[in-house]
Image: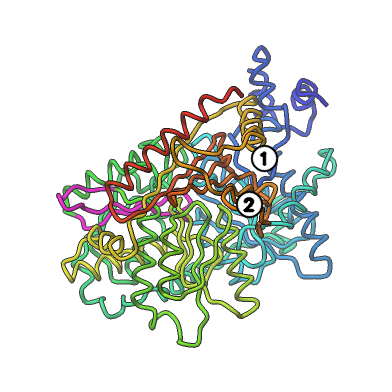
Amino acid sequence: MDYISKYSFWLEDNYFDKKTKEELKLLKNNDDEIKDRFFKELEFGTAGVRAVMGAGTNRINIYTVRKLTQGFANFLNEKYDKVKKEICIAYDCRNNSKEFAVQTALVLNANGIKTYIFEDFKQTPLLAYAIRFLNCIGGVVITASHNTYEYNGYKVYGDDGAQISYPDDKNLSDHINKLKSIKEIKILDLEESINLGLYNIVDPKVENQYINTIYNQTINLKDLEKETNKLKIVYTPLHGTGGLIIKKVFDKANFNNIFMVEEQLKPDGKFPTVRYPNPESKEAFKLAINLAEKVDADIIFANDPDADRVGVGVKDKNGNYKILTGNMIATIMLDYILNNLTKVSNKDDNIMVISSIVSSDITKKMAEYNNIKYEEVLTGFKYIGKKITEFQKNKNYKCIFAYEESYGYLVGGYSREKDGVLSALFLSEICLYYKLRNINLFDVLENIYKKYGYYIEKVEFINIDGIKGLEKIDLLMNFMRENIWQEIGDIRITELRDFKNLKSKNFITGETYNLNFPKSNVLYYKLEDDSWFCIRPSGTEPKLKIYFGSNGKCLEEVENRLNKIISNVLNKINRLDI
C-alpha cells in the first residue's frame, strides 16, 4: 500500500476516531506532509521508538502505540509461553503520555497479560527498578527523554530491568512488522480490564523502597548528615518528572538547603521556558544559573524530563557557574568511588567499571591504575545493563560504576538503567565532602588530570532532516566504509573499528581483528597521537553524531590538538559529495 492509499484508509475507515480524521483532512493539499506521515511504518529501533506526535503511520499516536504493543504482546506470549506474565508501565509528563500508557496496558490486557501502571508521572529509573521489585517479565515507559515537545516515545524493558537488547529487540521488531492489519490488534476497555484484575495501579511502597535503595548507594553521607545544611543546592526538573521525587530524596538525606527553579518545577509537556529540555544544553541551565547566583549555590542540578540523566553546574575559580561535561561528571564520581573502595566492596569482590566506546578514555586509565576490570560497550545504556546482568548472573564481577558520556550514570548494581535521581544525590554527597575540606570540584578535576593526564572530549552534530536526510546518513556511512580515510590533516589514522561489520583494521601492522560487540552502524577511528573520533547516526533523532577525544600532559596542548582534529574531520565530511 503506497502512502496515498494509507492516507485514504486512515481518512475513511471507522477504526480511526473523528479527531484523527479532522487532523488528516487539513493535509489534503500538502503532498509532502502526507508522504512524510505515511511513507513508512514506525520502526522499533535500538532505543525503542521516538517520533513526532500526530496522525499517520510514521507518527506516534494511539493507533501506532496499539500496534507496537500488539507486537510486544505477541513477543511476550511466545517467549513466556507458560510463565505468569506481568508488565510494569510508566509514563512521563509529555503530552499524551498517560493516554499512550493506558492504551499500552489495555492492549496487553486483551492479550492476557497483567499490567501494573503508575498512577501519575514517574521517572524512567523508577520504572526500571519497579520491574525487578515487582518480579515483572518486562516494562514499558512512555517518554521521549530530552527531545523537543513535539516528540513522544515508547521504550521496552526486559525482566532484568534493562532495555531489551539483541536478540530480543530484533525479535520484538519482527513481531511488530508482521502485523499487517488493524484487525490483528486486540484491546479491552478500561472498566473490563479492571474488573478482570488485569489493570492494576502500582503500590506507592515501590517508590518508597526505591528511595531507600538509592540512599543506600551513598558512601559517606550518614557521617556527613549533621553538615548537610552547609551545602546550597539549586535544582530544576526542566518541567519534567524529577521535581516530583527529588525533594523526597533530599529530605531523606537531610539536604534541606535546596532551592527549586519554580518556573520549571511543574510538569509540563510543552516545556514553556526551554525549547530543548536537555541537561546537555547550556541554554537549559539559564534560569537555574540565575537562581544560583542569587542564593550563592554550591551546585546546580538539571534532570531531563524522565529524570534518567543529570547535568551539573558548579563555580569555577573565578566564581562563575560553569556546566560540567558528562565525562567530567563521571570522572569526579569514579574518582570518589575509587578513593572509598574499601567502603563499596569487600576485599574478595571482583569489581568492574563500565562505560561506552564514546566516553572518555580516562575511565579505562583510572580502572587500570587501580587494578580494576574495565568493560567497554556500545553507546546506549541497555548495553551497560546487559553487561551488569551478565556478570552478576555468572557471579564473577560486581559493577561499582557505569556511565555513558551523555549524562547517564549508575552507582552500584541495584539497577540496569542510568539514574539521574541517584546521581544528583551522590554528587551532592561528593560536593559536600569536598566543600568541608575547602576544595572546589574544579580543583578535584585538576588533581585527577594531574594524576592520570588531561583528557578532553567533545561532540559535534550534523542535522539531516526528512526522508532524504535518512537516506543521506546511510549513504554517507556506506561511502566512508568503502572509501577509508588514512589521515586527518597531518595526523595518521592507525586503526578503524567498523561495528557494523565487526572488524577492526590496524593500519600499522595491516592486521584485521574481529570485534566482540553487537552489530551497530558505527565507525571508530584511532589516531597515532592517541586521539580518536567516532561517527554514528543518532538512535533517537535525525542527525549524525561525531565524538572526539584526546589526551596529554598539558591542557592547552590537548585542546589545540582536539580543535584541529574536529575542524579537519568536519571539513572532510562536508566536502563529501553524497
User: Counting other residues with Cα less than 10 Å from the Cα at mark 1, is it few (<14), some (14-19), or many (20 or more)?
Assistant: many
Q: Amino acid at mark 2?
A: Ser
Left or right, 420 with reference to 172: left
| Relative to 402, residue 38 above or below | above
Observer-nearest residue: 342 or 475? 475
Q: Tally the marks.
A: 2
| Relative to 397, residue 4 above or below | above
Give the residues drawn in magenta, as a range.
Answer: 297-322
Asked whether residue 72 is in view, the answer is: yes
Are circles 1 and 2 on residues that touch, CB within 8 Å?
Answer: no
> Residue 131 appears in which quarter of the rendering?
bottom right
Q: Which residue is mark 2?
A: 504
Observer-nearest residue: 331 or 69? 331
Residue depicted at 52% across the width and 56% down the height: 356
Q: Is residue 310 magenta?
A: yes
Observer-nearest residue: 420 or 433? 433
Left or right, 516 with reference to 357: right
Q: Amino acid at mark 1?
A: Ile
Q: Position of residue 228 (x, y in %)?
A: 23, 70
